[in-house]
Image (cartoon, rainbow, N blue to C red):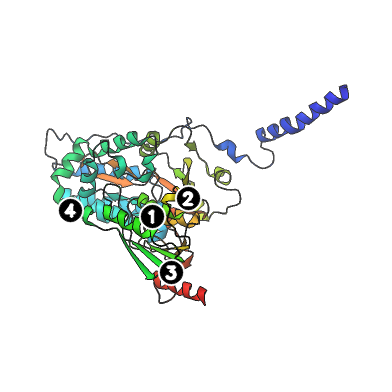
Amino acid sequence: MRTKYISIVLVIILIVVIPVAARFFNFGEPDYQSVITDASIEAPIPDEPVIEPVLIAERGIDDITREEFLYDFDYLVYVLETNFPSFGIVYRRHGVDMMSLAEELRKELTDESRDMDIERFIELIRVDFLGQARQIGHLRLVLYPEWRQIISIDELNYDFFYYNFQYHPYLRDLSTFRLDVFRSAVSEKRYTHSRHLLDIRPMSDLDEVRAIEVDTIEDGRIAYINVRSLPNRISINPLDLETLTYFLSSIGGYQHLIIDIREAPGGYRGFFDIIAKPLIRMPLTGRRDYFFMNGTRNMEFMQTVLDSGMKRTFNISDLRTIIAPRITFPEYVLDDLMYMNYHFRMPHVMHPLPREERSPFQGKIWMLISESNASAAQIVADFYKYSGFATLVGETTRGMMPPPWSSAYFSLPNTGLIIRYDPAYVINPRSSRPLEEGTEPHYFNRRGLDALETVLEMIREADD
């Protein structure tokens, strides 16, 4: 009997005590998961300069000194340096070192021999500095049309923001967080007073725009949908929904459906879901991993939209456990992730519609993509490629992949100008690349042919 108990104790020691001791003393393979600590343990945040905004009640909105312009510029650079994760991508894609560029532009601000007023400062920020990122990470100066659209949204009309808000529990907090930036006293005065400088691309009458065109390339065999834009729920034209519903219900028996999103630069991903849902029979699944720097703006953003169960501190040594043990990441991705402090994962599942609401189409689906596709169109290309919904043909998309609750915003304290940026560095674990680099098609355009011509040639070859 004693021998039996001794054997049981020895087994317990072998199974429990020795592995625990090995982890404690770091014997063998390191335990990467142990590095992920509770979200309450915050990484250190760099010191932020004290904000001393112009007292606009006491003087004019354009009575800004050179020192105050310089302060706003330094504040902009500081916030981006400690919050914006995509400078490496800007450099690799466009050869622009944004921090070196900032040093050069700062010289103009300190040069007493050169005039500096609000018009030149807006141009310096919009074109000479942020413009050089070419919209990577949605990095840009907010212009009057965007400011006007957000500022005028009724507090209950949240569908303007991205599709994820329909189920995201922190919607109201995030909307308030964003609107506080847009409705600050300095920013309201700036965008009202300087509309002539910021109204560079006036809003169009979205209600009159048709987002889709449908056609049959070969009757009874090849159907075609041209998605020209991805309007949000406020601006979806009811005629588009009627056209789409009728068309999808009429292509039963067709062998091929070509969905062309090459013209869609971005917008509202949910509009494409309206097209896709009637066509699926089984749930589509995807996953993305989001990484954040620990700058003050990002911390405010995450505290607004993430509960403690979603956010985790991150160290580069966590990567094998967090993503997938067998994925090999390019060296430049590892370099980018060295600057990240937090991580969370966002799964996405699209469920099919009830049988009576589905399209009778059961053929092959093709999706045409181009380098014009960015933002929401980039999300569409990435999700529908890796979920197996469609075969992609065309060019690598442009990227600009936002986090699931859209972008973050902050304002410059003296001028009131508002800056937009995406706070997350996003990786699709199936591709091991940041989504800012775009999504490659399954098949690139053939020599001398565009995407549609390539697909039609592929279909003809398969029939021969």
Q: Earlier in the sequence, mark 3 or mark 1?
A: 3
**Residue 372 found in image quarter:** bottom left
**Disc 2 marks which amino acid?**
Ile
Dot 1 lies on which element? helix
Front residue of this view, candidates 66 and 280: 280
Front residue of this view, candidates 115 and 130: 130
Q: Earlier in the sequence, mark 4 or mark 2?
A: 4
**Disc 2 residue crowd, few under 14, some 14–19, many 20+, Cα 10 Å:** many
**Disc 4 marks which amino acid?**
Arg
Front of the two marks 4 and 3: 3
Residue at image x 38%, y 44%?
A: 423
Front of the two marks 3 and 1: 3
Checking the image for residue 415, the label placed there is: none
Q: Is residue 24 above or below residue 110?
A: above
Residue at image x 36%, y 45%?
A: 163
**Disc 3 marks which amino acid?**
Arg
Q: In the visual, does 320 lie left or right of 187?
A: right
Give the distance between the C-alpha atoms of the residues marked 1 and 2, in whole angstroms. Answer: 25 Å
Front of the two marks 4 and 2: 2
Front of the two marks 3 and 2: 3
Q: Earlier in the sequence, mark 4 or mark 1?
A: 4
**Disc 1 residue crowd, few under 14, some 14–19, many 20+, Cα 10 Å:** some
Residue, far top:
2
Image x and y of residue 441, in percent = 46, 63
Image x and y of residue 346, in percent = 47, 43
Residue at image x 43%, y 62%?
A: 252
Dot 2 lies on which element? strand
Dot 4 lies on which element? loop
Checking the image for residue 114, the label placed there is: 4
**Residue 18 found in image quarter:** top right
CB under 8 Å between discs 4 and 1: no
